[in-house]
Amino acid sequence: MKVIGVIPARFASTRFHGKPLADICGKPMIWWVYNQVLKVKNLDDAYVATDDERIAEVCKQYNLKYIMTGDCKTSTNRIHEVAKKIEADLYLCINGDEPLIDPDVISAIIPEEPFDSDFYVSNLMTAIEDPVEAIDFTNIKIVTDSENNAMFLSRSPIPYPKSSMDYKYYKHVGVVIYTKSALDFYASTEKGKNEIVEDIDLLRFAEHQKKIKMVEVTAHSLSVDTPKDLENVRTVIAEKIKTGEIKL
């Protein structure tokens, strides 16, 4: 089984322009993410996928493999362009804004048991520990069925605890894996009404009764969505370098 890791990277981020090239202790953020991805078990190769020459130049400078794509509307579209250029059984998408993401967390999504090689989509999820995260619209909440397939994804806190408080909220982790046929389906299917309202890529599958296998992990997210988040990450990484936990 051939599994390719892909890190979508665009320069023109709405909330944080040029985010992939933001400096973290002397290295661009995309370097940190790429090197964490290289540590993932059972991954055959890894690429940055971008449409921006500035990001491509940095990839060249730091010897990061990259693939140029068109001006894609979503990260899933960008992964689909990679899938048209490189043949693999599974394409693993890793968000480019978590420079300290745990490689073991990423590897949890690579299936060990037989899966539908024709059509397969899977996403990581983790329990929400901080109540504030449940109402933060940037955290995508998930409800699943008895087999851990996604029933719905929302930026609102779901489900609503009307009759019981004995429940954990779960949020998605920015790691998704697809077969080529699943990516083909996504690229050839129009947005549904719920995807348009929520602005969540994976709803394109859910709205057409396509299974999304959710894999629960313990993940302490440290993502960079804003310049303020970047300062927090810099502080954490600087401390890890100082204590020798990270060696450059």
Image: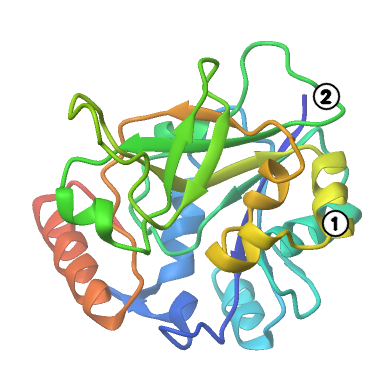
Kindly report which numbered mark, 2 or 1, lies closer to the viewer in this rendering: 1
Q: Are marks 2 and 1 in contact (CB under 8 Å)?
A: no
Please state which amino acid type lies under the numbered disc 1.
Answer: Thr
Q: In the image, 91: left or right of 142?
A: right
Q: Name the residue located 18 percent from the left edge and 40 percent from the top edge.
A: 129
Q: Name the residue located 44 percent from the left edge and 79 percent from the top edge.
A: 19
Compared to residue 248, the image places residue 101 above or below, namely above
* Residue 115, horizontal then vertical, whole percent: 73, 18
Q: What residue is pinned by disc 2? A: 117
Location of residue 233 by image quarter: bottom left
The circle on residue 189 is: 1
Residues at marks 2 and 1, CA–CA distance in whole angstroms: 20 Å
Residue 33 visible to the viewer: yes
Q: Name the residue located 79 percent from the left edge and 37 percent from the top edge.
A: 179
First in sequence, mark 2 or 1: give its number.
2
- Circle 2 sits in a helix, a strand or a loop, which is it? loop
